Image (cartoon, grey):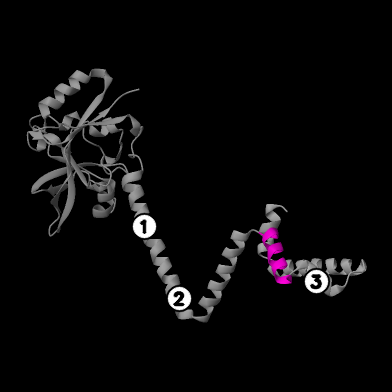
Amino acid sequence: MSLWSRMANVFRGERLSREIDREFESHLEEAAAQGRDAAEARRAFGCRLQLREASREIRLWAALDNTWQDARYACRGLRRNPVFAFTAVISLGLAIGANTAIYSIVDAALLRPLPVPQPQRLFTLEVSGDNDTFSYPLYEQLGEAAGDSARLALLDPPNRVEAQDSAAGAPYEEVVRQFVSPNVFDVLGVPPAAGRLLSASEDRYPAPRAVVVLSHDYWRRRYGADPGVVGHRLSVGGRAYSILGVAREGFTGVEPGKFVDVWLPITLGCGSHPGQIEMNIPE
């Protein structure tokens, strides 16, 4: 018997039972036609119930049949107790929704590749040992030594600070700030969504321009995605900056699980940085 027939028999149990009974009766009639006593023939065939169950096991998919029977029994039990059924459905819905939300967060924060072109070509360099900092001159020397074989960008670890818009009465809010070298967006291949991003003209080490680049999420959350905020003043960590532009949608930084709100030229920070160098190796 084919697998499809055995699967179909699971959902037509009464019909299958009738077919087995008719087959059993046909064997008894055949024995009677051959001159055998009916009672003796029944004894020779054995217990009718056992024969029916053995035949059912051959003619249907036993595992699926057990699952179907359990499901029917559960449905009958839920119909008898609607309050319990409602509680069970709500509990399952909440549990499934919570797991889905958790998976969505983990997928977005940890599993997906960085939202940049060709993320497989990016490598992170970190300093280990007692001296775990990169000075800006050291970063420049490494960039010169790499030449055309790689492009380097320097990133400081993200940290939380208070920010306040320049508008009168604007409240303070906590944002995630990150100092980066001016070429970081060019190295990562991140275009602007509004205004423009950091470039060498903002560097001018050791006297960079006081400018800030907003993430797309922060721009939409704080300013309603208003392109007119370019050139606006924003205080970050107690210092005023001019908004230079907005990074494209989806880019929130280079560390999984850490969502940066604003980026600043790294030379606005301290002279050496316990950060990392992001290296893009050309094809």
* Kind of residue sitting beneath label 1: Ala
For the magenta stretch, what is the residue range?
Answer: 47-60
Q: Position of residue 230 (x, y in %)?
A: 22, 44
Q: Are marks 2 and 1 in contact (CB under 8 Å)?
A: no
* Disc 3 element: helix
Question: Is residue 106 rendered to the left or right of residue 223?
Answer: right
User: Is disc 1 surrounded by few (<14), some (14 to 19) or many (20+) residues within 10 Å?
Assistant: few
* Kind of residue sitting beneath label 2: Phe
As for residue 85 lying within the magenta part, the answer is no
Q: In the rendered view of the protein, which quadrant contains the C terminus?
A: top left
Tag 2 residue: 86
Tag 1 residue: 101
The alpha-carbon separation of the residues under discs 3 and 1 comes to 62 Å
The alpha-carbon separation of the residues under discs 3 and 2 comes to 50 Å
Q: Position of residue 9 (x, y in %)?
A: 69, 62
Question: Is residue 259 rendered to the left or right of residue 94?
Answer: left
Nearest to the eye among marks 3 and 2: give it.
3
Nearest to the eye among marks 3 and 1: give it.
3
* Disc 2 element: helix
Q: Which of the two discs, 2 and 1, labels the residue nearer the N terminus?
A: 2
* Kind of residue sitting beneath label 3: Arg
Q: Which mark is drawn over residue 42?
A: 3
Residue occupying image coordinates x 26% and y 23%: 150
Residue occupying image coordinates x 49% and y 80%: 81
Nearest to the eye among marks 2 and 1: give it.
2
